[in-house]
Image (tube, rainbow, N blue to C red):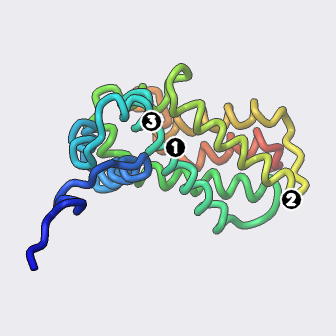
Amino acid sequence: MQTTNAGRRPVGRPAAATREQVLGAARLAFVEGRRIEVRAIAAEFGASRATMYRWFGSREGLLAEVVLGEMAALFARADARARGRGADRVLDTLETVNRRLIDNAPLRSFLALEPSGLQMLTSSSGLVHPGVVAIAAAYLDRVATEDDFRPPIELTTLAYAVVRLSEAFVHDDSPAGMRHEIGRLREVHSALLGIAR
């Protein structure tokens, strides 16, 4: 009896990509320290440019989702190991996050490979900075609920301040900057959180 190929899916590239597959491939490139090439990822999964635009809006939109996913996971891991409660828990989490950002090889590769990478990460009008502030605000709100933490200033303002300070200490390379001075950053964060020295 002779068989036909009618109705069978051809071997090779899948017929249709999913948003999660594309995001996963972009995340893998980021973690491995490679430049995220949207066209190559789209071709790998058979996604059209129109589909990519519908899913992410732009290349920056895809990059932002990858970075924000990594930041949310970093906050979660740091909080899981944090000591203390309330403000002390927040301070410990922030210090862990900042130290890991300094030592983060994928982030260093991203900044080296992307000509406007630092601006992409820190611009108020971009997608990443507001997203990180939102992650920090959600974290502060969770600690406030779980530990009866009472932020000394309005929660969203506090989130913005701790993120902006972290960006300055982690990324600033100006001669007068305090790049990688995490001990000094901890002191400033302590003051913002109302922790007496």
Residue corresponding to mark 2: 147
Label 1 – label 3 distance at C-alpha = 16 Å
In the image as oriented, which residue stretches furthest toward the left?
2
Specify few, some or many for label 1: CA neighbours under 10 Å numbering under 14, 14-19, or 20 or more: many
> Mark 2 and 3 residues: CB-CB less than 8 Å, in contact?
no
Q: Earlier in the sequence, mark 2 or mark 3?
A: 3
Is 79 above or below relative to 149? below
- Dot 3 crowding, Cα within 10 Å, few <14, some 14–19, many 20+: some
* Residue 106 in view here: no
Dot label at residue 55: 3
Q: Name the residue that disc number 1 marks.
A: 68
The answer for how far apart the CA atoms under marks 2 and 3 are is 37 Å
**Callout 2 environment at 10 Å: few (<14), some (14 to 19), or many (20+)?**
some
At mark 2, the secondary structure is helix
Please tell me whether mark 2 or mark 3 is closer to you in this view: 3
SS assignment at label 3 = helix
